[in-house]
């Protein structure tokens, strides 16, 4: 295989043969093909796309570029949830223990924040001691013990994706449906989960901003998963405004704790329940949505899900006592209120705007090598549909210093749109895509 011929073929809009795709990925993983040729192929794919066969072969090649975890040794049904990334999306933290309490093993390999979107691992890493680098045996042991584990992708799992993702991040080739689908599915298939529920975020704070693109991405991922014998379905959920009332790592852990104690805001609870219902349905633990919902709610009401979350945190080396006393979590030195400058109805809270403010406060990375500040972000964020008077609290900014807090206050204020007319609470679930 001559790499430049494969690049030229895709550049000119032709289909690649399976062995060309496999050889390219294999040689890229073993560093025979340099980054610049992989970047050129990624750009050609960005413009020309991949057909169903090509994207399945690419996923399979990336999945087989490293180890695969065998979750059948767990002897329980397994299900994972993967979000394509959003602002304030702490659903995984709640969902994993809730679903585990229903008898389903949740092997969750999560990622760090990408661009303005937050990462589950960064959130959990704000709990002192929490390890996000479990090896495969430790990962399986934690699931055996408490039903769920959330850790990072190991170096040996889908290494082709690890390399390619970092390259796409700096070559303008992230927002490509076949590349996103292959990236997500190669990791999730290698992780060994029998079933998978995809939360495809759609809106200004997501990679997919148009419903038809979100649907197309969901359909491609479901086709790949079912072609490889896994049960996969997807919800397309609204990411026009942040999910819940916090964005920022430790702040989102605090919101998770409150939610597990029965104090979740409706949007966060509803998205979590809808995804959980799908996980119970795909694993055949429940067949109808109403009983799955009831069972999931009961895990919170009984206190079991919170206990399970603390157990998982402790098994992964984290300070579970910090979840009973959240003052032990990192605290930002400066907290500034964002107050309404006029009265009215909240018409929009731009997820993109809040995400940018939170990233600039230090909660996310501008470069992959940046260290993040776990304490900073936004809490008490107002939601679309609320009515406020002049001087009411719209949000609270948590910052490392006064100057950064003031910049963020203006950014958050600019992200909030007001209306004189009553505004309806937006739809949360914009669509469901199931395997036919
Ligand atoms: N998440 C991933 O894992 N890969 C992508 O390409 C985009 C989001």
Image (tube, grey):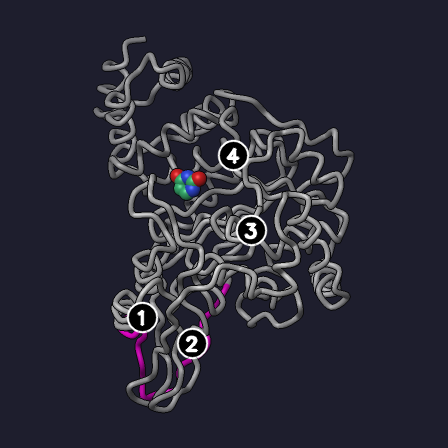
Q: Position of residue 8 (x, y in %)?
A: 22, 19
Q: Which residue in the protein does label 1 denote?
A: 412
Calculate the distance from the C-alpha at mark 3 to the C-alpha at mark 1. 28 Å
Calculate the distance from the C-alpha at mark 4 to the C-alpha at mark 2. 34 Å
**Span of residues in magenta:** 413-428
Calculate the distance from the C-alpha at mark 2 to the C-alpha at mark 3. 29 Å
Q: Quadrant of ligand 1?
A: top left
Residue 436 in view in this figure? no
Image quadrant where residue 409 sits? bottom left
Element type at marker 3? loop
Q: Answer yes or no: disc 1 within 8 Å of ligand 1.
A: no
Judge from the rendering whether residue 147 lies leftward or rightward of residue 384; answer left or right. right
Neighbours of disc 3 within 10 Å: few (<14), some (14-19), many (20+): some
> Residue at 62% across / 35% down in the picture?
230
Element type at marker 1? helix
Q: Answer yes or no: disc 4 within 8 Å of ligand 1.
A: no
Q: Which residue in the protein does label 3 denote?
A: 128
Nearer the N terminus, badge 3 or badge 1?
3
């Amino acid at each position: 295989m001559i790499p430049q011929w494969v690049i030229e073929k895709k550049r000119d809009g032709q289909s690649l043969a399976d062995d060309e795709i496999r050889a390219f990925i294999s040689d890229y993983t073993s560093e025979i093909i340099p980054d610049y040729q992989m970047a050129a192929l990624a750009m050609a794919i960005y413009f020309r796309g991949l057909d169903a066969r090509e994207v399945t072969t690419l996923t399979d090649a990336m999945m087989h570029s490293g180890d695969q975890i065998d979750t059948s040794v767990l002897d329980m049904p397994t299900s994972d949830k993967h979000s394509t990334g959003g602002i304030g999306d702490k659903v995984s933290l709640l969902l994993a223990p809730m679903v585990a309490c229903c008898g389903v093993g949740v092997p969750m390999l999560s990622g760090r924040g990408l661009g303005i979107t937050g990462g589950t691992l960064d959130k959990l890493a704000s709990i002192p001691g929490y390890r996000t680098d479990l090896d495969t045996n430790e990962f399986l042991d934690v699931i055996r013990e408490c039903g769920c584990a959330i850790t990072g992708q190991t170096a040996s799992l889908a290494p082709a994706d690890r390399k390619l993702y970092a390259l796409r991040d700096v070559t303008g080739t992230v927002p490509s449906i076949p590349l996103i689908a292959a990236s997500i599915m190669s990791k999730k298939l290698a992780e060994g989960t029998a079933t998978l529920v995809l939360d495809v975020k759609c809106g200004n704070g997501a990679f997919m901003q148009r419903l038809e693109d979100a649907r197309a991405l969901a359909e491609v991922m479901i086709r790949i998963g079912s072609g490889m014998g896994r049960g996969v379905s997807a919800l397309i959920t609204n990411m026009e405004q942040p999910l819940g009332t916090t964005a920022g790592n430790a702040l989102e852990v605090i919101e998770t704790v409150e939610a597990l104690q029965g104090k979740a805001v409706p949007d966060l609870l509803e998205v979590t329940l809808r995804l959980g219902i799908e996980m119970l349905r795909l694993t055949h633990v429940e067949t109808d949505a109403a009983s799955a919902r009831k069972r999931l709610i009961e895990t919170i009401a009984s206190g079991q899900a919170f206990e399970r979350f603390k157990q998982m945190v402790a098994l992964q080396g984290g300070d579970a006592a910090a979840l009973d006393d959240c003052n032990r979590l990192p605290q930002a030195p400066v907290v500034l209120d964002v107050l309404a400058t006029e009265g009215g109805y909240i018409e929009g809270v731009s997820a993109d705007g809040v995400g940018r403010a939170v990233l600039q406060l230090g909660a996310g990375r501008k470069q992959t090598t940046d260290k993040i500040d776990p304490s900073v972000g936004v809490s008490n964020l107002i939601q679309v549909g609320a009515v406020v008077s002049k001087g009411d609290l719209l949000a609270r900014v948590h910052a490392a210093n006064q100057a950064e807090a003031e910049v963020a206050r203006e950014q958050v204020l600019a992200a909030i749109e007001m209306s004189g007319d009553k505004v309806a609470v937006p739809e949360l679930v914009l669509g469901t895509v199931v395997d036919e």
